[in-house]
Amino acid sequence: MGDMEYLVVIDLSSNNLTGNITSSIRNCSKLRVLDLSGNNLYGEIPNSLGQLNMLQTLHLRGNKLYGEPPSSFQNLSRFITLDLGNSMLKGSIPQWIGDSFRYLRMLSLRSNAFSGEIPSKLSNLSSLQVMDLAENRLNGTIPATFGDLKAMAQVPNGDKYLYSSRGASNYKESLVVDIKGQSRNGQIPENIPNWHQLSSLDLSSNSLSGPIPPSMSSLSFLAFLNFPYNNFSGTIPYTGQMTTFQAPSYAGNLGLL
């Protein structure tokens, strides 16, 4: 494989491959797509992948990889898709992700062991449309600078997708939002109605507080709402679209009426 210098796509996904990712892949200098997802590969992600300067799409999801994303990835400025989900990666989410990938549209780090806060520099990813940080050990608040992500369409976190923050009015094409079970605090943004295409909102099992904004009743595309087990208080705004959701959507919020 390492001698196939004109190879453009490698797709070995959903097999039973084992062992380490071979460092000889770096010799595939024209490679644009590398998909090794859904195997039993283990070990650290080799630094040598950072030499694939033409690489645009990398899928390593669903393996047994550990350690941290290699810093050599900073060289891969053509990235459009980076999927490192469902492994055993740990440490903080690297700040350099936000500085290096101006064309990145999809970032998935879900179902790993990343910890700490979400780096504010991720807001530098001006082309980003999908960000999946679900099922990690992240804490703190969602960076207010995420309001600068004007290309954002979906931000997965939990089983679906994560959004939030001050400046949320810029997320006018949002589809699905989920920050389920991620130790988030704070309140629901007042300007959430500006996410006009929002169809699913899951904020369950966090430490969110304050009232549910009455303006949410104007979200005419909202088909799924899940707010259980937070610290919301006040009156549920049973008007408009909010009349379509039942008591289980709000369970475990003792301050809600």
Image (tube, grey):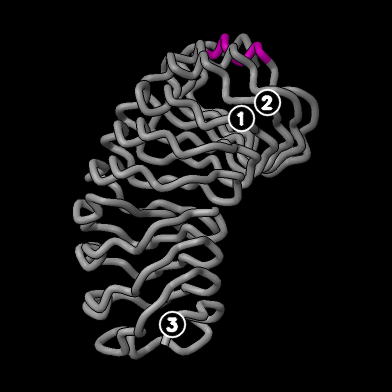
Whether label 1 touches label 2, CB < 8 Å:
yes
Q: Nearer the viewer, residue 151 or 157?
A: 157
Residue beneath disc 3: 256
Q: Residue 223 magenta-drawn?
A: no
Q: Along the horizontal axis of the image, is 162 left or right of 12?
A: left
Q: Along the horizontal axis of the image, is 208 left or right of 135?
A: left
Q: Nearer the viewer, mark 2 or mark 3?
A: 3
Q: Which of marks 3 and 1 is in front?
A: 3
Q: Where is residue 186 in the image (x, y as percent from the top left)?
A: 39, 57
Please, what secondary structure does the residue beneath circle 2 have? strand
Q: Position of residue 108 (x, y in %)?
A: 50, 42
Is residue 220 among the parts visible in the rendering? no
Tell me which numbered mark, 3 or 1, is placed earlier along the sequence: 1
- Residue 91 has which mark? 1
Above or below: residue 75 compared with residue 255: above
Q: Where is residue 56 in the image (x, y as percent from the top left)?
A: 42, 27
Residue beneath disc 2: 67
